């Protein structure tokens, strides 16, 4: 590994700034290598040390990793702790009570500061309110909230009493919410009257009402409604209550419920290859350990930092790097309600300047759209703002193309700030492959190297390692503390999705393709190897969208594929066969619009296909299998050069090439 610096001299490489190296938690490549070596030499010893040093345990663990029931691994199992205690009480005991935990900036620019002491009081009141509603340890609480202090409070309050939260992104439809509430068996839903985004009030409570009315949700005993806008909502007597009223009478003291390290902290639904989203279940101890450690390693968080992760709490990034990680290390963070383009596309830069943000973490899609905006409107170019407070930049959720990387590096980071391109997944709980800001020489477009203690590798279909320079499947060869524990209610699916028997049943299959640089071993991610799309950094299963389309009474058949998109990374293209004859012209346009909105209603606006094309049929083999690879070529607008001799109906290709 010592060769990396010299090899990289031949490439476009960006060394970490000396000032950063000097004070970084992991300072220089030798320090990184030493940690990797420590983990290699004594894996359990390494993790035990990290867990003791980084978490406060109510009861210390004596066992570290248990592999007897693989792939259902456990970590620190006989230890007891509480996530909310680790995030709040522990910071106050360390003298940080008056430090700002959250600087909340509302859509309209109003800023509210919440100290650690205030946050603990709010979490405790909410936790007591949940208890008053009968919520007990192990019960599930669905949180369908806007970006807000209350959203974080709701998550932390669940953790405080040992309830397992399941946050559903506020952009999901009533139907998606209904499915998640049922699957999780939730007893309470926490929501808001409305959410404010880009100057507009959008409904939340009305969607909860619709979701619960769809049936199957009889286990939901209460709906707690945060009054955000004061908008008109229907309150069902005996079931619904206003959050502000509910917490008003509650004590601001709440003894944390000590739980075993394996106690499920949360379930978060994510898309897979089949139509049904997977409820990814995370633990308390291992998950929180990694949230805390990666804040220190990847973001090199320091007491004076102002950290800002722009994700929504409805996604894993918002769980680990808003609701838990920053609080677990006693940082000050920004929580932002709005959107990057309101009141104008300079909002992010203006906020960085206003709050003196020093560590900024966002998604390539946001960067790409802000590049476009800055090109069109020079007044919102980041150069117009004082971004001198920044010291580290981060990227997450999708590959960042080298052009966007360079723009981010030069125009936002002023050429001074390392970019940590973090590869990870809902299932990994936290970062897995990422540069370290005070150590790793950066190459645009590469997420570089695995973090110490996570055995990331690339293998072929038989599970054999492939040499550098040869692509393959990204895997993690040993269990690690923050890994997914199971799929809620479906352990068989957990095994078959992530630990396929072809790979021996014990190696975690990430579902991404990857390649390592021949000389440096740096990883580059090549996208999903399954039927999962990545649209604006959001995971969408093609089958989920297909199921939504065929649920429409006019649709006979549908196939969904991805197509590269300059802004969103990938765009959704749907090929649709109607039960009636193929529409053309204006009628096709009208029906495409209707179907797009239909998918928006079925799943949520993020799943709306960008392009819908109608055919008399779909390209199929003689045995009736849809040839998706041909559809992918057509979606890209490229010529078909592959063999089409096995096709039942080759003429269909010409028809589908025509846009609707
Ligand atoms: O394909 C990879 C892509 O996002 C997938 C995980 O999506 P999700 O579970 O929603 O989590 C997103 C936030 C962690 C991965 O399988 N992905 C994530 N980060 C990167 C990435 N692809 C390339 N580079 C990344 N840095």
Image: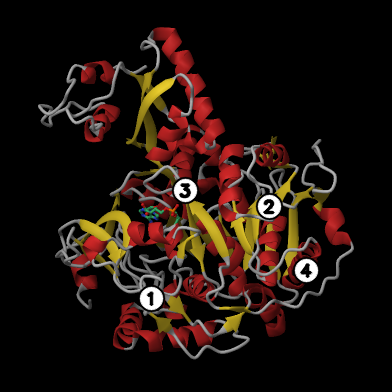
Distance (Cα) linking label 1 and label 2: 31 Å
Q: Which residue is mark 4?
A: 118
SS at circle 3: loop
Q: Which quarter of the rendered picture does the N terminus lie within?
A: bottom left
SS at circle 4: helix
Residue at the spot 61% in from the left edge and 54% down from the top edge: 185
Distance (Cα) linking label 3 and label 2: 20 Å
Residue at the spot 70% in from the left edge and 66% down from the top edge: 157
| 3 or 1: tag closer to the N-terminus | 1
Q: Mark on residue 277? A: 3
**Mark whose residue sits in front, 4 or 1:** 1
**Mark whose residue sits in front, 3 or 1:** 1
Q: Which residue is mark 2?
A: 219
Residue 303, percent across and down? 60, 75
| 1 or 2: tag closer to the N-terminus | 1
Distance (Cα) linking label 2 and label 4: 32 Å
Distance (Cα) linking label 3 and label 1: 25 Å
Residue 467, percent across and down? 14, 65
> Is residue 253 something that shows in the picture?
yes
Distance (Cα) linking label 4 and label 1: 42 Å
Above or below for 328 versus 516? below
SS at circle 2: loop
Locate residue 572: give its quadrant.
Answer: top left
Q: Quick check: 587 left or right of 160?
A: left
Does mark 3 have its CB less than 8 Å from ligand 1? no
């Amino acid at each position: 590994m010592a060769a990396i610096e010299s090899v990289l001299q031949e490439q476009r490489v960006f060394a970490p700034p000396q000032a950063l190296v000097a004070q970084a938690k992991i300072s220089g490549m030798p320090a990184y290598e030493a940690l990797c070596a420590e983990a290699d030499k004594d894996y359990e010893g390494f993790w035990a040390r990290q867990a003791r040093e980084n978490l406060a345990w109510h009861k210390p663990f004596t066992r570290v990793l248990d592999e007897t029931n693989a792939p259902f691994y456990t970590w620190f199992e006989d230890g007891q702790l509480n996530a909310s205690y680790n995030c709040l009480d522990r910071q106050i005991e360390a003298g940080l009570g008056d430090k700002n935990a959250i600087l909340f900036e509302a859509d309209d620019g109003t800023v509210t500061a919440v100290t650690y002491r205030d946050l603990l009081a709010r979490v405790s009141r909410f936790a007591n309110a949940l208890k008053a509603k009968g919520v007990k340890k192990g019960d599930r609480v669905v949180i369908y909230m806007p970006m807000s202090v209350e959203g974080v409070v709701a998550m932390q309050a669940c953790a405080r009493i040992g309830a397992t939260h399941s946050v559903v992104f506020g952009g999901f439809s009533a139907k998606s919410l209904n499915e998640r509430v049922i699957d999780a068996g939730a007893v309470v839903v926490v929501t808001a009257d409305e959410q404010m985004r880009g100057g507009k009030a959008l409904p939340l409570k009305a969607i909860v009402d619709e979701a619960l009315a769809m049936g199957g949700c009889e286990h939901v005993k209460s709906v707690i409604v945060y009054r955000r806008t004061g908008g008109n909502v229907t309150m069902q007597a005996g079931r619904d209550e206003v959050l502000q009223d509910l917490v008003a009478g509650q004590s601001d003291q709440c003894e944390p419920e000590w739980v075993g390290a394996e106690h499920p902290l949360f379930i978060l639904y994510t898309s897979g290859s089949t139509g049904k989203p997977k409820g990814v279940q995370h633990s308390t101890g291992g998950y929180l350990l990694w949230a805390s450690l990666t804040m220190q390693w990847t973001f090199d968080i320091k007491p004076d930092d102002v950290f800002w992760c722009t994700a929504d709490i409805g996604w894993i990034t918002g769980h680990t790097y808003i609701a838990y990680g920053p609080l677990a290390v006693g940082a000050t963070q920004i929580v932002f309600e709005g959107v990057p383009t309101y009141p104008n596309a300079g909002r992010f830069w203006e906020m960085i300047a206003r709050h003196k943000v020093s560590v900024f973490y966002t998604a390539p899609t946001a960067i790409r759209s802000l590049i476009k905006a800055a090109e069109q409107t020079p007044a919102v170019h980041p150069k117009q703002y004082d971004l001198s407070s920044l010291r580290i930049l981060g990227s997450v959720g999708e590959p960042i193309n080298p052009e966007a990387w360079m723009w981010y590096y030069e125009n936002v980071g002023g050429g001074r700030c390392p970019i940590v391109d973090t590869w990870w997944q809902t299932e990994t709980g936290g970062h897995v492959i990422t540069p370290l800001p005070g150590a790793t020489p950066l190459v645009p477009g590469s997420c570089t190297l695995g973090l110490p203690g996570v055995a990331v590798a690339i293998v072929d279909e038989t599970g054999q390692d492939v040499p550098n320079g040869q692509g393959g499947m990204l895997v993690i060869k040993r269990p690690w503390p923050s890994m997914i524990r199971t799929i809620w209610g479906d352990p068989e699916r957990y095994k078959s999705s992530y630990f396929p028997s072809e790979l021996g049943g014990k190696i975690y299959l990430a579902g991404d393709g990857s390649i390592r640089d021949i000389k440096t071993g740096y990883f580059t991610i090549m996208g999903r190897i399954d039927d999962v799309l990545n649209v604006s950094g959001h995971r969408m299963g093609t089958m989920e969208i297909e199921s939504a389309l065929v649920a429409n009474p006019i649709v006979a058949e549908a196939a969904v594929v991805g197509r590269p998109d300059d802004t969103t990374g990938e765009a959704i293209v749907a090929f649709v066969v109607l039960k009636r004859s193929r529409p053309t012209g204006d009628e096709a346009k009208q029906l495409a619009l209707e179907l797009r909105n239909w998918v928006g209603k079925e799943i949520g606006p993020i799943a709306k296909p960008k392009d819908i094309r109608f055919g008399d049929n779909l390209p199929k083999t003689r045995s009736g299998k849809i040839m998706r690879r041909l559809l992918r070529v057509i979606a890209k607008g490229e010529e078909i050069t592959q063999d089409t001799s096995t096709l039942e109906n080759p003429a269909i290709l010409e028809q589908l090439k025509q846009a609707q």
